[in-house]
Structures are given as structure tokens and as C-alpha cells.
């Protein structure tokens, strides 16, 4: 893990780790990126809860080995899901495990395929998701969340940003996001 970002962010990286520091460094992109993530993860959705969408973001970030994003979005998902952090850990570590409902399992398979590359999403994966009860809107949104978080993961890690050693630092932000979103 880097102790300092690859570029001079002109701020205390321990106070502004990960994407937080990058957004402070380049505020012109902060607004559009926050609008995108708010739409994807927090805005009203007819079937996927904010916690489920955060879980997809945490899962993709975990699979991409992006420590900052996986830790932060795991906390944000745990805050909004009945199973809390034990459920989030189980989904991230064993997405095909017995605790993962079939529809979510199928959507996570699509998210993982998207993370590897867009053409990795096959007609078979989509058919399996539909067979498990996923709608076209859910499939669409999971692909978009996985693609966006792959970009965010590369942004955070590509510039070598820091990540807090203690994941509990994300708890206050998790409560704030659960109540107000990414505004």
C-alpha cells in the first residue's frame, strides 16, 4: 500500500484518503462523479434497494482489489442491509454461497463479468439472471454500477491514493449516506 499518492494532491492524505482527496484535488469532476454515484446507488429504484446497490459496488471493488472503495462501500452497504457487515463479507467472499439469494447471485455474476470486461457478459449470464427473477432494469443497472465502479477503482488505485487502516472510520459517512445520499 502506498503511503503517498502518485501526484501531489496538496492536502493531508490521511484526512482525505481515496477518492475524497482526488475530488478535493479536482473539484470540477467531483460534482458529476457524485451525481453519477448518487443516481446509481442512492436514488429511488423500483426494485433494488440502496443497500443492494452498495453491495454490488462493494463486491466489484473487492474483486478489483481496491481497498479504499471495497472498505468504504462495504460499510455503506452494511449500514443499509439487515444482515449488516457479516452479510456483506459473506457476499464479497463467497458470492455463490447459500446465504446469497439466487437473483442476487445471478446479478453478482453479471457484475463480476462486467468488471473483467464488457464482452464477458454473456447471453447465458443474462438468461440465468432473468430465470432467477431479475428484470431488464436490474440487469442494466448492475452492469452500469459494475462498469462505473471499475472506473472508480482504477481512478483511486491508479493515482496511488491512501486508504485508512481502520475500516470503522467509514461508519459516520455510512450513516450520512444512508440518510442523505452522495450530496
Image (cartoon, grey):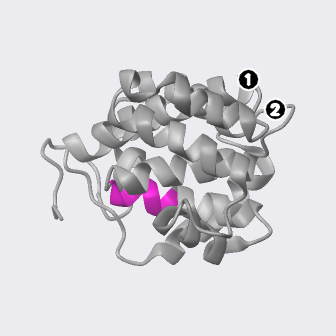
Pick the quarter of the image with the N terminus.
bottom left
Q: Is residue 9 visible?
A: no
Separation of marks 2 and 1 at Cα, in angstroms: 9 Å
Residues in magenta, as a range: 66-72
Residue denoted by label 2: 45
Q: Residues within 10 Å of mark 1 (few under 14, many from 20)?
A: few
Whether 51 is drawn above or below 131: the answer is: below
| Secondary structure of the residue carrying numbered label 1 | helix
Q: Residue at x 52, y 54 (%)?
A: 58
| Secondary structure of the residue carrying numbered label 2 | loop
166 and 28: which is toward the camera: 166
62 and 176: which is toward the camera: 62
Residue denoted by label 1: 137
Q: Residue at x 60, y 28 (%)?
A: 126
The answer to which image quadrant residue 143 occupies is top right
Q: Residue at x 47, y 30 (%)?
A: 148
Amino acid at each position: 500500500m502506498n503511503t503517498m499518492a502518485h501526484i501531489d494532491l496538496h492536502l493531508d492524505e490521511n484526512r482525505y484518503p481515496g477518492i475524497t482527496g482526488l475530488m478535493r484535488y479536482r473539484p470540477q469532476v467531483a460534482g458529476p462523479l457524485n451525481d453519477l454515484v448518487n443516481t446509481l446507488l442512492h436514488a429511488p429504484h423500483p426494485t433494488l434497494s440502496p443497500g443492494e446497490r452498495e453491495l454490488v459496488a462493494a463486491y466489484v471493488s473487492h474483486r478489483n482489489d481496491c481497498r479504499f472503495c471495497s472498505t468504504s462501500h462495504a460499510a455503506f452497504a452494511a449500514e443499509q442491509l439487515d444482515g449488516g457487515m457479516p452479510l456483506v463479507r459473506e457476499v464479497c467472499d463467497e458470492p455463490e454461497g447459500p446465504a446469497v439469494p439466487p437473483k442476487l447471485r445471478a446479478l453478482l455474476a453479471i457484475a463480476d463479468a462486467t468488471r473483467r470486461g464488457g464482452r464477458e457478459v454473456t447471453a447465458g449470464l443474462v438468461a440465468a439472471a432473468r430465470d432467477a427473477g431479475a428484470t431488464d432494469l436490474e440487469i442494466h443497472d448492475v452492469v452500469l454500477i459494475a462498469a462505473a465502479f471499475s472506473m472508480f477503482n482504477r481512478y483511486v488505485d491508479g493515482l496511488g491514493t491512501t486508504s485508512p487502516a481502520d475500516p470503522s472510520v467509514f461508519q459516520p459517512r455510512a450513516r450520512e449516506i444512508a440518510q442523505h445520499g452522495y450530496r
